Amino acid sequence: MARRVALLLLVASAAAVAGVYDQPWSTVEPGDRSEVRKEFPAAITQIDGQSVRDTRRPEAIAPGKHSITIRFQTGRMNQSESEATRVVEMNLEPCTRYRVVAQRQAGTKWEPHVYPEPISECARKFEKPAS
C-alpha cells in the first residue's frame, strides 16, 4: 500500500512539472557578463509579484505579458533600493528565452538590457508542419 501511494505521488508530481512544458513556454534569466559593453548579470527576483525560487535560473513561464523584477547591486558603492531594483514590463513570445543584463552607466546608475533568443527544444516540439 505504501509503495502504491508513493508511486501515485511521484506520478502526480511529474505531471505537475511536465504541465508547463505541455505547451510553448518562455524563460527570463540573467545574461552573461560583458566588460566591453559594461553589462553584468542581474538577478531575476520576481515574476508578476511572486518571488522566484532561484534568481539565477527562474522556472519556465507561459508566454504573454509579465512584470519582471530585476535586481543589480554593485559592491563598489552603496545603493538605495530604488537604485538596485527595476520592474520591467515584458510581452514574452512563445519558445523564447530572454537574457537580462544590467548595463552600467555612471556611478550606481544602470539600465536593464534584454537579449531574446529562440528555445530550439520548444520550437521543435511545437513547430507547425508546413501545409
Image: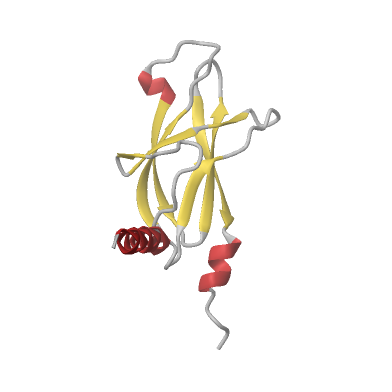
User: 127 above or below 57?
Assistant: below
User: 33 above or below 15?
Assistant: above
- Residue 104 figure quarter: top right
- Residue 71 figure quarter: top left
Between residue 60 and residue 90, name the one nearer to us. 60
* Residue at left offset 62%, top offset 37%: 32
Residue 64, position in %: x, y? 37, 57
* Residue at left offset 46%, top offset 10%: 78
User: 129 above or below 91?
Assistant: below
Q: Quadrant of the C terminus?
A: bottom right
Residue lying farthest to the right in this orientation: 36
The number of discs equals 0
Residue lying farthest to the front in this orientation: 1
- Residue 47 figure quarter: top left
Q: Is 57 situated left or right of 13 in this image?
A: right
Q: Is 62 situated left or right of 29 in this image?
A: left
Residue 68, position in %: x, y? 39, 41
Residue 95, position in %: x, y? 51, 61
* Residue at left offset 55%, top offset 82%: 129
Q: Quadrant of the N terminus?
A: bottom left
* Residue at left offset 44%, top offset 53%: 60
How does the figure colour the protein chain or chains? secondary structure
Between residue 33 and residue 58, name the one nearer to us. 58
User: 53 above or below 78?
Assistant: below
Residue 39, position in %: x, y? 61, 31
Between residue 50 and residue 86, name the one nearer to us. 50
